Image (cartoon, grey):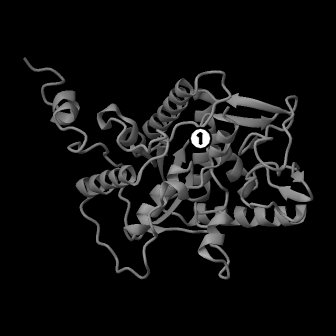
Amino acid sequence: MSNPYSSLGSEAFWRPAVAEAGAHGLTGLWNPKFRIRPRDRIVTAGSCFAQHIGRALGARGYQWHDAEPAPPFMTDEDARRFNYGIFSFRTGNIYTPKMLLQWLQLAFGTGEVPDEVWEQDGRFYDPLRPVIEPDGFASEKELRTAREATLAALRDAVRSADIFVFTLGLTESWENAETGLQYALCPGTVKGAAFDPDRHVFRNGGFRALYKELQQAMRLMRAENAGLKVLLTVSPVPLTATASGQHVLTATTYSKSVLRAIAGQMVTELKFVDYFPSYEIITHPVFRGMFFAPNMRSVEKAGVDTVMTHFFADQARVFGAPKMPKRKKAAAKPARVDELACEEELLGAFAK
């Protein structure tokens, strides 16, 4: 008897597609909407896992765009310490949809420039990216000048990019109760600002609010670049800590579930948005946690390699193998676990 399932391929059934294939035999996890070509200008931003994607693309000869390169006199070590070359612009980690929207609104003049600046011991810290300068800025003017440079880089990146890769990381955040400004990190956990319970409020975003914020961000970017395509991913890295009152394990499941649902809905509704399942590849039970370091949080190099193998294989399966250009310079080195810039990890210092 004919039914809707009788004509489906083996990938639609758990036994042949997963149980029998096993962790190393899985194929076709992604049916990409659009081709990503080596010549495409690719911008990366978001949670710390986005750094892996940017470096892997660069290592394969794809055109990862660094819109805010380090000054030529800086050593590689100092450039990294001052957060150059980590994402396509010097924003630091952008963990939430609202934080992305906030940066875009500032860059394109649709948001109110925050007056808030943090100060400690004569040094100044940007609440949007408090760890971007390890020792803070020498003055408020220097802070604002540096931020304007990053906003200019963000404008350039969005307007000139072919592909914008954004990795969703968290639902939890801290905001200014009076202005609504969302901070990169909880005040009091880094230099610059003491925590004020009357002024600093916790927010754990739900589906509706976060979806609306991400949708606004997508539309704002497309208004500036009508040909831009967006590739969403969800970071597989668990929360370092939670202020939700829940166990950190269940809080992580909530956060990642909401973000994954948002990404899925966005792909359904917007033709120019796609989702790549790096989250599933790292965290699914079929992989038995093999890609996590002993701390069960950091993703090992083998995991990143597996993620990117699926990425390139599925692009080639759907669109054919790309014609690679001649390499003009040495590829970026793959990131080690301890090299990733993950600001949220600073919260781990407060564990008892």
**Residue 108 visible in image:** no
Q: Where, by quadrant of the figure, is residue 246 drawn?
A: top right
Q: Residue at x 74, y 36 (%)?
A: 174
Quadrant location, the C terminus: top right
Q: Is residue 73 above or below residue 13?
A: below
Relative image position of residue 38 (x, y in whole percent): 38, 68
Q: Residue at x 65, y 61 (%)?
A: 154
* Kind of residue sitting beneath label 1: Leu
Q: Can you name the residue that lies furthest to the right here?
A: 122
* Crowd band around label 1 with a 10 angstrom C-alpha radius: few (<14), some (14–19), many (20+): many
Q: Is residue 166 above or below residue 80?
A: above
**Residue 235 visible in image:** yes
Q: Residue at x 46, y 38 (%)?
A: 296
Q: Residue at x 58, y 66 (%)?
A: 85
Q: Is residue 112 above or below residue 242?
A: below
Camera-side residue: 296 or 170?
296
Residue at label 1?
214
